[in-house]
Amino acid sequence: MQGKTHFRVGIATGVAVAGFSWEQLDFWNMTGTVIVAGIASMIPDIDEDGSLINKALFSKLNRKHRSLALCAVGVLIVILAAFYQLPTWVTLIGVFAACVAYVPHRSVTHSLLGITYVAFVCYLASTSFSYAILAGYVSHLIMDAFTVQGIPLFWPSKQKIGLKQMGVKIKSGSIVDVVIGRVAIGLALVGYAYILYLQVGQNMAVN
């Protein structure tokens, strides 16, 4: 899938997560949940120099230098976390960035191991956005499972898991890819507006 499709599906996933707990969320937390899920949906492609997330992070750098930059940022985070005695989850984010900088595309970041690692970091961070982060990340893998290439879910096993056996063969950049992204963002906008409507109604009832 294209990066923008992943992002749009991630946004829709964030709206879904917010929808499950809209009564406990204010406007800013709900909006943050949606945005965080969208960003998290792009993280699995951080191992690809030309991915949307790497373009956003290192837009000023030549594509061939982005892996080096990502690795350097990861090492710097680890050093700063040790020096300032920051929480363990900060160190783990640095380790993740440094380690995935040079791994092959669609390997560890597209696997159960990658999901487990991200889930563990979210657990340690214990942030209110943990579910949104994990949901956004997983949405990326689900979407890639629909593609011809599939995903190495059980990495380091090289066997690819996908829906190709069921006749679902979506190519990145194809019209189906584009339509999925557009439908996802459309549903996200409708869902977001509906949740806002519910919150306004709830606030009026309380007042």
Image: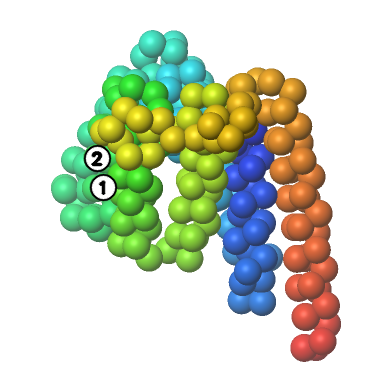
Which label belongs to residue 37? none
Kindly state the secondary structure of the residue where label 1 is placed.
Answer: helix
Residue that badge 1 annotates: 92
* Residue furthest to the bottom: 206
Q: Is residue 1 above or below residue 9?
A: above
Q: Which x, y percent locates residue 106? A: 40, 28
Q: Quadrant of the N terminus?
A: top right
Q: How is the image coloured?
A: rainbow
Q: Which x, y percent locates residue 120? A: 31, 56
Kindly state the secondary structure of the residue where label 2 is placed.
Answer: helix
Q: Residue at x 25, y 58 (%)?
A: 87
Q: Quadrant of the C terminus?
A: bottom right
For the residue pair 67 and 149, the one nearer the viewer reads as 149
Q: Quadrant of residue 43?
A: top left
Q: Quadrant of residue 61?
A: top left
Left or right: residue 138 compared with residue 23: left
For the residue pair 161 and 15, the one nearer the viewer reads as 161
Question: Quick check: can you spot residue 73?
Answer: no
Q: Which x, y percent locates residue 79? A: 19, 40
Number of numbered labels in the structure image:
2
Q: Which x, y percent locates residue 178? A: 72, 28
Which label belongs to residue 95? 2
Left or right: residue 26 compared with residue 112: right
Residues at marks 1 and 2 touching, judged by CB atoms closer than 8 Å: yes
Q: Residue at x 48, y 65 (%)?
A: 128
Question: Quick check: can you spot residue 157?
Answer: yes
* Marks 1 and 2, how far apart at CA: 5 Å
Q: Is residue 47 above or below residue 141?
A: above
Q: Amino acid at mark 2?
A: Val
Left or right: residue 120 compared with residue 199: left
Q: Amino acid at mark 1?
A: Leu
Q: Residue at x 79, y 45 (%)?
A: 186
